[in-house]
Amino acid sequence: MSKDYYKTLGVEKNASKEDIKKAFRKLAHEHHPDKGGNAEKFKEISEAYTVLSDDSKRAQYDQFGTTGPSGFGGGQGGFNAQDFGFDFSGFQNGQNFEFDLGDIFGDFFGGGRSTTRKGKDISIDLDLTFAESVFGVQKKIRITKTSKCRECGGTGAKAGTGMETCRTCNGKGKVREAKRSIFGTFASERLCEECSGTGKIPKEKCSSCYGKGVLNREEEFDVNIPADVNDGETIRLTGAGEAIKDGKIGDLYIRLHVRPDKLFQKEGKNLVTELNIKLTDAVLGAKYTIKTLDGDIELKVPEGSEFGQILRLKGKGVPMGGSKRGDLLVKLNIKIPSHLSRKAREDFENLKKEGL
């Protein structure tokens, strides 16, 4: 009885190649022998994927229920696992696979790919006044972190001694490993931990960092906070995080906390404030000295001003780049007296009679 490859992978007959690939990857993770899975089940799903991932074999299988006399992995254009460091001798008579073993087994063995090592990122909090968040400011910060050793410049070697070939990896920077399974021997490479992949180690270790190339110390940074930042924003300083021997320095992330201001709020590129004025000044007009982020200025309140009216002071708002700035919007609040003298009441009564 012919095998149902679609049922083996748990997909429909009209499944796309991507769906078939996803199904195989999931089952391969589950049943791979090195992960404690079922070896026979792994053989079955591998056979099913080999057929269904190849358009011509799949078409032949759909029509005749077989892929021809060559059976599993037949054909001459197969994928040679040995070219990628895998020995599958004895598995299905040594037939070649027709899927990407680097793609499938990379999750199990890391694929032998080299990656750039990087130190840890650091996150700190920084408080700003409202004015500092509007105009920008330069701040000095001090943090204790893992940094490159100043004595040896991060090499880990004592000054004047230099480096020599790593004896663990013989200068290759990688260590080759072999794992045996019922399928044969899997060969892979990993980064040499002794030399961190450089192939070199100190002839004599630095007396400050003891060959590590890094140590903990306090560092000071000048941080330029740009204009127009908001509470909760984060600034990244590339290369200001923690150092790692023979690798990139991590980044420093600065989270900004802006203290609210009693007088001002931001609305886009404009600043908004409120001004309490007397009723008579609203009717007759007056001059008030008000505070701005640039200092005190005199504001003219026109006669006949209304409650909630907005007076605009151009160029007193948030910087917009170059010399341009937003405006300061002053909202008028008219104070209504709660107690009136007899004379004032008579005056208002007369105004009322006049229809005012």
Image (cartoon, rainbow, N blue to C red):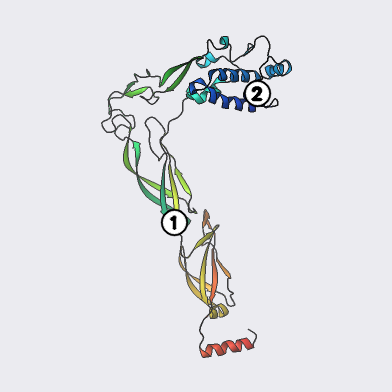
Instruction: In the displayed orientation, state which residue is furthest to the left.
Output: 207
Q: Horizontally, is 333 left or right of 172 in the view? A: right
- Of residues 157 and 215, the one nearer the viewer is 215
Dot 1 alpha-carbon crowd within 10 angstroms: few under 14, some 14 to 19, many 20 or more? some
> Residue 277's spot in the image, x, y percent?
52, 75
Q: Earlier in the sequence, mark 1 or mark 2?
A: 2
Task: For mark 1, give the secondary structure.
Answer: helix
346 and 227: which is toward the camera: 346
Quarter holding residue 189: top left
On screen, residue 96 above or below 28 = above
Tag 2 residue: 7
Q: Which mark is residue 132?
A: 1
Residue 111 visible in the displayed image: no
| Residue depicted at 55% across the width and 88% down the height | 345
Picture coordinates of residue 336 (x, y %)? 54, 79
Give the side of residue 159 with respect to residue 98, left or right: left
> In the displayed structure, would residue 269 be above or below residue 348?
above
| Mark identifier at residue 295 | none
Give whichever of 206, 232 is nearer the camera.
232
Figure check: 225 above or below 118: below
Neighbourhood count class around disc 2 (C-alpha, 10 Å): few under 14, some 14–19, many 20 upward: few
Image quadrant in which the N terminus is located: top right
Total marks drawn? 2
Residue 106 in view (yes/no): yes
Q: Residue at x 61, y 87 (%)?
A: 351
Place of residue 313 in the rendered image (x, y in percent of width and height, measured from the top left) = 54, 66
* 70 relative to 82 in the view: left or right: right
Q: Residue at x 46, y 28 (%)?
A: 115
Q: Amino acid at mark 1?
A: Glu
> In the image, residue 297 lies at what x, y percent?
47, 69
- Give the residue type that dot 2 points to: Lys
Residue name at image x 65 percent, y 23 percent? 7
